[in-house]
Image (cartoon, rainbow, N blue to C red):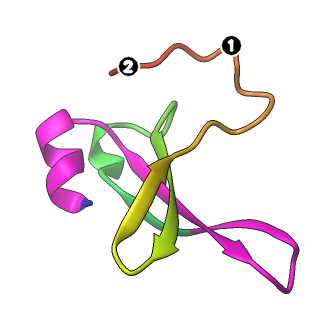
Amino acid sequence: MSLCSDNCRMPITVYMYDKDSGGLIAIAEYGQEYGKENPIRVLYHGFGHYESLQIPGKKGAKSRL
């Protein structure tokens, strides 16, 4: 993810489903030197599998991709 963040020059936040809380938790952040607003958000499923993620309520933010 760090390489992706550096190539895109954008922050990336990685989330994972947490059974205990019943929701998503942030497990990693990359590229904070590129800012903290409107990061690329991805959901980690394990075994190296990621999916893009849109957080509800964040519809107003424009994608920087």
Q: Quadrant of the N terminus?
A: bottom left
**Where is residue 29 shown, x and y percent of the image?**
43, 61
Disc number for residue 1: none
**Quick check: 49 above or below 6?**
below
Q: What residue do we see at 15% from left, 46% from top?
A: 6
Q: Is residue 17 left or right of residue 23?
A: left
- Residue 27, magenta (yes or no): no
- Figure quadrant of residue 35: top left
Q: Quadrant of the C terminus?
A: top left
Q: What residue do we see at 46% from left, 38% from top?
A: 39
In the picture of the structure, the residue carrying the numbered disc 1 is 60
Q: Is residue 2 left or right of residue 56?
A: left
**Quick check: 8 above or below 43?**
above
Going by the numbered disc 2, the residue's amino acid type is Arg
**Where is residue 60 shown, x and y percent of the image?**
68, 13
Q: CA distance from mark 1 to mark 2?
A: 12 Å
Give the residues in magenta: 2-26
- Figure quadrant of residue 59: top right
Going by the numbered disc 1, the residue's amino acid type is Gly
**Where is residue 24 shown, x and y percent of the image?**
72, 64
Q: Are marks 1 and 2 in contact (CB under 8 Å)?
A: no
Q: Nearer the viewer, residue 36 or 21?
A: 21
Disc number for residue 64: 2
